[in-house]
Image (cartoon, helix red, strand yellow):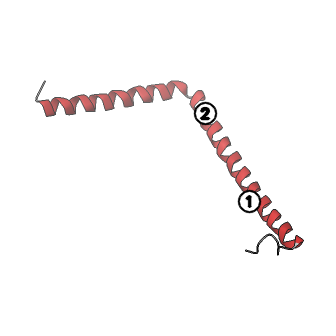
Amino acid sequence: MANAQTRTPEMIRASIEETRRELTFSVNDLHSKFNELTDVRRQLIKNRKAALIGAAIAGFVIGGGVAATISILTGGR
């Protein structure tokens, strides 16, 4: 890359345009990710009851698995 003193106005313009394209891509990518996050929240709110039931079942299974493992390791009943 040429140093700042040897860069022509055309080179500077080209660099600015490249930076603008990269920024546009980054902004569009962030916008897309934000929309995905918003959609997940919307779906969770829409299906709140099912999500809560699933979380309760998962907690029960995980808790039971931990309790059973501790019981087996300690020889308790």
Does label 2 or label 1 sit earlier along the sequence? 1
Residue at x-position 26% and y-position 32%: 66
Residue at the extreme front of the image, as rendered: 5
Q: Quadrant of residue 55?
A: top left
Residue 16: percent from left, percent from top:
82, 63
Q: Mark 1: which secondary structure?
A: helix
Q: Position of residue 27 (x, y in %)?
A: 73, 50
Question: Which of the 4 image quadrants contains residue 53?
Answer: top left
Residue 73: give x, y in percent of width and height: 15, 34
Q: Is residue 3 above or below residue 23?
A: below
Q: Quadrant of the C terminus?
A: top left
Q: Residues within 10 Å of mark 2 (few under 14, many from 20)?
A: few
Give amino acid for label 2: Arg
| Residue 74 shown left or right of residue 44 in the figure | left
Cα gap from disc 2 to disc 1, whole angstroms = 29 Å
Q: Is residue 70 left or right of residue 8?
A: left
* Nearer to us in this view, 65 or 48: 65
Q: Which labelled disc corresponds to residue 14?
A: none
**Circle 1 is placed at which residue position?**
22
In the image, residue 45 above or below residue 30: above
**Badge 1: how crowded within 10 Å, few (<14), some, or many (20+)?**
few
- Residue receiving disc 2: 41
Q: Secondary structure at mark 2?
A: helix
Looking at the picture, how far across and down is residue 4, in whole percent?
80, 69
35 with respect to 10 (left or right):
left
Left or right side of 16 for 29:
left
* Three-letter code, disc 1: Glu
Residue located 20% across and 31% down the image: 70
Residue at the image position 74 percent from the left and 59 percent from the top? 22
Residue extending farthest left: 75
